[in-house]
Image (spheres, rainbow, N blue to C red):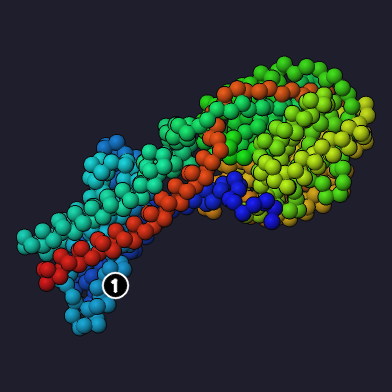
Amino acid sequence: MANDSTAPTHSAAEDRQNRLYSRFFFRAPSTRWTLVALAVVSLLDAVLTWFPGASLLRFTSGWVLVFLLPGLLGVLLTTPVAKALGGHFPWHRNALLGLMGVALPVPILLIWRGVGLAVGTLPVSIPLILLFVLGPILWFRHMTLFGVSLPKHGASLPASLLQPLLAVLGIFLLYPPPAVWVLAGTLFLLFGFLCAALLLRAADRPLRREFAASGVSFIRPLIEHVGSRDPAATEILEKFFAGFAVEANVRVTGIQFRTARGTKATLALPAIHPGPFAALGASNLPQKFEEMLGPNAGLVLVPHTPCNHDLDVPTAAEVRRIGDAAASMLRDLPPAASHLTSPLVSPTPGSWARAQVLGDTVLVVATQAPEPTDDIAYAIADRLVDENRKSHGPELALIDAHNSYKEDEGDLTYGSPRALRFAEDVRQAVTAARAQAAPGTVRVGVALRSGFSVARDGIGPSGVRALVVETAGRTTAYVLLDGNNLLQGLRDRLMQALGGVVDDAEVMTTDNHVVHEVDGGVNPIGERIPFALLRDAVVGVVRDALGNLETVEVRVGTREVADVAVLGPDWTARLLTSLGDTLSMFSNAFLMTFLLLIASSTVVLAALR
């Protein structure tokens, strides 16, 4: 095991949190195909209800009036009614809800038909069983519209009632009702609404208890943020996260490689974690930092720095404050005082750290690979930087390569035996690199491969980037993959593929949390993209970078940004626990309220027999 205790680590909590989040996401089918399926399933409902025995006219009219027309009109009317009452329910979700409205009766009608075959006669009449199934339809529609459209019963109920009430109208056109049927239909719908309300209240309790906020009210903003990056939805979610933030001082280190024409590349190393999720706050940090630093920064690389979810920045405004500080610092970088350079040095076989001297800075890349490697506690890196400054050494720039994923393993926590080993490996790597440093020039080449898909490849919008550094006659490739970690074992295979291309290399990931917007949540690189394609992209981008090597001046700077809002210790664990309780409560309440609905409605049926 790569962890030092059995307590849940930040990365373990992160992985579980992302899997919990991702359960809410699925891609609804196209409206066209959903409506075709609605017509087919509604026909199945009609077959179960009237075949055999009914005339063709009765069968056709029943299919159209009770199932098909209410389903289609429900789809046609639900979106505008929801919008008129302050909600928002897109057409593709609306069509899927209409399909569910005709699918829910199928198992009930199957049981009804089965009992009829077993006893030789139908247990209840056709009109009553058709009224009976309307309760589950309203139950499902209302829980959906309340959560996804607008979390207010009064505003969601009219849209929820559309399909069931249209079906009631069709039933009563076919079968003129006595008063007792009207009463039964009213009770079935009332039970459906009450059971939906009970389910929603139960599911809301864990987050209300822990955070004094409605979890159901966040479903729509979460879907709209993920689906369309809706600014209003993003603001709602970030406001919630920001309400629990604490203040911290954040260090930003920047390394620029400048030619006579301008900046060729920038290594941006903000000590913040690229979370919490999707594109909220510091999530999607590489793309956000590149946009904030602008084209004058050249090709921007934002590798993962040693930190964990304690340093998630919850709002885009705070990320902009850090980005503005970094941009200001980079504009004012002083000329290099030192022209010493070294190759990328590993002090001992199996060391977790390798270092390279580049003028006024020592760049250190850390990984526990081939063992699992994940987040490194910020306190470990902060202590190393502080020690280095007290010794008046060159600026220490630390990168967590974050490149060997195994579930629930790989975190380094402050004070643990593995953290002590890591710190010692970093010290030795810095010492070894400085011992091999000599005056010399630096040549740099950069390249980018883009066009990857989060869902298809597990790679974020910043793609695959390469920074090739040539010093002391040796070439070193720093390859940065925009994603959350790399499947264990792939780092070594990629390094082997680069062995004949450059002298030294490291393959890193950004830990970008935007890649969690897929089913499964964690989405490490290598889980979706075939290895051959990944290898070709990595080797190709390094070859591209080798093709534009040119002499550069290396400048480095560091700035502290005071009082940055971060989520702080244990917040992720609190949210994880509440989300787990919410899903558990929802699952149990889903089953219990459905059974309660069926039982109470069955009592009404029994009373009417």
Label 1: how many residues lie within 10 Å, few (<14), some (14-19) or many (20+)?
some
Closer to us: 22 or 582: 582
Measuring from the top left, give residue 229's x and y in whole percent. Answer: 48, 36
| Up-down relation of residue 415 to residue 139 (above or below) | above
85, above or below 393, in the image: below
Residue appearing at x 93%, y 29% in the figure: 438
Which residue sits at x=25%, y=67%?
Answer: 46
Q: Residue 375 appears at what percent x and percent y? A: 66, 43
Residue 450 in sight from this viewpoint:
no
Give me the residue at 66% from left, 27% from top. 251
**Screen quadrant of the N terminus:** bottom right
Q: Does 48 appear above or below 225?
A: below
Percent of width and height locating residue 392 = 82, 24
Element on which disc 1 rests: helix
Asked if residue 153 shows in the view, the reply is: yes
Q: Front-most of 522 and 118?
A: 522
Q: Nearer the viewer, residue 564 or 412?
A: 412
The quadrant holding residue 53 is bottom left
Query: In the displayed structure, does residue 97 sit left or right of residue 269?
Result: left
Q: In which quarter of the image is the C terminus?
A: bottom left
**Does 517 sit left or right of 434 as displayed?**
left
Q: What residue type is labelled 1?
A: Leu
Picture quadrant of residue 114: bottom left
Can you identify the residue that label 1 sits on? 110
Query: Which of the pair 393/174 is nearer the observer?
Result: 393
